[in-house]
Amino acid sequence: MKYYSGKLFGFTLAETLITLGVIGVVAALTLPSVINNYRNKQLQVAFKAAYSIFSQTVINMVEEDGAGLKKKYTKYDSASQSYVNANEFYDKFYKYSKLNVIGKCSYSGKIMNYNKTGEAYSSYTSYTIVGRETIDKLLSNGMCSYLYVNAGQINITVDVNGTRGPNMLGHDIFYFTIDENDVLKPRKMSNLYDEEELEDMDFSFVAGIPCSKNSKQRGNGTGCAYYALIDESPDDSTKGYWESLP
């Protein structure tokens, strides 16, 4: 309100419209950032919960089965050309996680890579398959998961918030393995290759286990779990991982 010579005046229509316009512009500029930060915080909390549960699962398995999980469950039989203890691992892992498999995860849309430059794919290598049909175990806490023994590795893929979005590698979908010391190990990028270097590589879509906003590989995001865990951007160590999601 305005006061002049003891008289009370209201705002003019023009002043009111200008004020509302300014408020609208400020809201339009800040609201997407607020929503994005809130979503990323939720993903961080869900990731930490998944990592905690699966780390404890590995500890529980060692207590029951003894040390040497990787050696035992990656035993390969050349006659049958199969990992003979793989199914036993799958059953025990879910048992010791104290999470029930209550159904199947069904994705309605595409699963994208870390910076959304392509549909995610990592084939049948030791980084596990990525696709709507593979991260298929719906767990009782709402997560989706996929276990895969291959190439001498025990691989664990988890979608920390189930089939809800964004369904992107390194955002809500992460990769882990169990190492020789019976520790749940987050996948970490080993090298960032440029397009020319990737041309002559086998499995170029996942070479270097990429995690970078600068990679166009379809497997970009397979090496993000390590950075998510320590909350450090793979492209700028001075920034946090979750605040820097592309």
Image: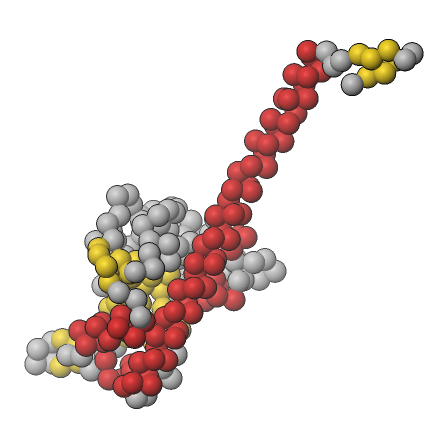
Quadrant in the picture for the N terminus: top right
| Residue for point 31% across, 80% down | 61
Between 164 and 178, the one nearer to me in the picture: 164
| Residue for point 56% across, 58% down | 240
Based on the displayed image, in which of its 4 quarters is residue 204 positioned? bottom left
Residue 50 in the image, given as x and y percentages of width and height: 39, 64
Residue 89 in the image, given as x and y percentages of width and height: 23, 76
**Looking at the image, which residue sits at the far left?**
79
Residue 108 in the image, given as x and y percentages of width and height: 26, 43
Between 227 and 100, the one nearer to me in the picture: 100
Residue 123 against residue 74 in the figure, above or below:
above
Q: How many marks?
A: 0
Based on the displayed image, in which of its 4 quarters is residue 239 positioned? bottom right
Q: Is residue 144 left or right of residue 51?
A: left
Residue 4 in the image, given as x and y percentages of width and height: 88, 13
Q: Is residue 105 left or right of residue 170?
A: left
Residue 49 against residue 63 in the figure, above or below:
above
Between 11 and 26, the one nearer to me in the picture: 11
| Residue for point 15% across, 79% down | 84
| Residue for point 17% across, 73% down | 87
Q: Is residue 55 visible?
A: yes
**Looking at the image, which residue sits at the far right?**
5
Residue 227 against residue 169 in the figure, above or below:
below
Q: Is residue 207 visible?
A: no
Q: Is residue 191 left or right of residue 104?
A: right
Image coloring type: secondary structure
Based on the displayed image, in which of its 4 quarters is residue 80 positioned? bottom left
